Image (tube, rainbow, N blue to C red):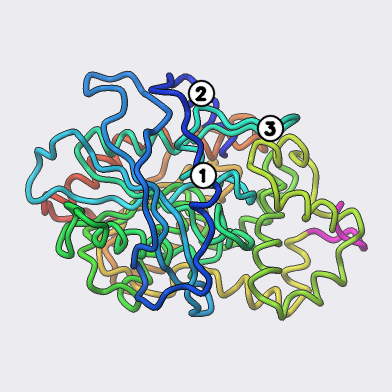
Amino acid sequence: MGACLAIVSAGAAPAAPAESAPADFYAVPTPLPAGAPGDVLKSESYPPALAVPDQVGPWPSGAQRIMYRSTDAHGEAVAVTGTYFDASVPWTEGGPRPLVVLAPGTQGQGDQCAPSKLFAEVVHYTPPLDFSVEYETIQAYALLSRGMDVVVTDYEGLGTPGVHSYIDRRAEGYAVLDAARAVTRLPGSRIGDDSPIGLWGYSQGGGAAASAAELQDSYAPELNIRGTYAGGPPADLRAVALTIDGSLATGFLGYSVNSIYAGYPQTRGEIDGILSPHGREVLDDIATQCTSETIARYGLHRTSEWTSDGRSVAELIDALPNVRAVVDEQRIGRLTPRSPVLIAQGRNDDLVPYGQARTLADDWCRLGATVEFSTQEIPPIAPGFVVGHVLPAGTVLLYALDWMTDRFNGVPAPSTCNV
């Protein structure tokens, strides 16, 4: 997804010479100072490198790179980085200016892929194939141009030491919620404890936003979350593994395997026992890459090429009990969001399957949540090349913006639970 959307973003013009993130900003204090989730460990201002021509100006905000305290999947304190954009456009709707936490879509697993680094570059390129443009510029700009402040988390292990916790339900949900907390604790922040907050994401970000929505009640009940937009959410990883294998994004499954291997030691013996030497080389390689390079090197291959007996990742999920238990733990939809949710899903999504997103909506409806499920009716286009996944992010964007604006204005949320 990242490489495809990057093509759209590449038309943006530079606002100023790129100011690369200093390496020492991402050095995590050891040990972490005592504190609470969401505490700010450090921050620095910087100029975003991309400008999108518009009547409101080249880039409608200032920017701060932040490092904040969060919690990993096992309850341990970790440091996570991100970017806070304070909108320069007036908020002209009802109530105080809101904050939207933008959970980014798949960036990759190398530290160079962190959004807080890419926002400071027009283009990241290291020969021969490490190429990135921060495509979340599009959604961040759309939100900022309406006067909403935006914070974008990098998630655990992206930019900071350790393996990025890719598609880990708790780690990503906590990083999203703690990003909101961090903005309220920044010195001089205009976002306060009672400020209205929205959660927003597509693809990996849709899953992270969905997870945060259902974890809020137990983890961050004090946040004034008004609504969540979860687009193309990977709520059932086994279903995603079946769909993605053999597509342009096959290598993204390597991010998931690396995340599970690093975060859940009980799975390592099982994974080591089935990887071929080539498979180990692939996973080590993928761990250092952004999405464009992963697509270029491993797209349209199959994960059966990584294993000693020719089984796929989806088949191994079923066969390896510890891996199966960890994957099952990642399923979203077992807890109840406190605030309304908009789920948008392409019917012919060729990366994140439609059925598992529909199941997520049904599960939340049964639990009593307020859910609107919006089907994006786009015909199949080049199946396996993730076009069916990328296009719905654009077709639903304006509706999602209006939906979120309505939540901040106190408009009753629509529901499709009884339809």
Magenta span of residues: 305-312
What secondary structure is the magenta-colored segment mainly? Answer: loop
**Could you tell me which secondary element the residue under label 3 belongs to?**
strand
Which type of secondary structure does the marked residue at label 2 adopt? Answer: loop
**Which residue is outermost to the left?**
94
Q: Quadrant of the N terminus?
A: top right
Q: Residue at left 33%, top 71%?
A: 216
Residue with the mark numbered 2? 10
Query: Residue 290 sits in which quadrant?
Result: top right
Distance between mark 3 and mark 1 Cα atoms: 17 Å
Image height of 337 relative to 63, above or below: below
Nearer-the-camera pick, 68 or 258: 68
Left or right: 356 in relation to 128? left
Amino acid type shown at disc 3: Thr
- Classed neighbour count for the residue bearing mark 1: other residues with Cα under 10 Å, few (<14), some (14–19), many (≥20): few
Q: Position of residue 103 (x, y in %)?
A: 42, 52
Where does the image place residue 223, in percent across and percent down from the top left? 24, 67
Q: CA distance from mark 2 to mark 3?
A: 16 Å
The residue drawn where x is 50% and y is 46% is 105
| Residue 319 at x, y percent in the picture | 78, 73
Q: Which residue is mark 1?
A: 22
Q: Is residue 284 left or right of residue 172?
A: right
Q: Is residue 334 above or below residue 349?
A: below
Return the x and y of residue 252 as percentages of the image width and height. 66, 49
Reading the image, the residue beneath label 3 is: 126
Nearer mark to the viewer, of 3 and 1: 1
Which amino acid, by three-letter code, is at mark 2? Ala
Q: Which residue is found at the position 22% from the left and 43% from the top?
A: 148
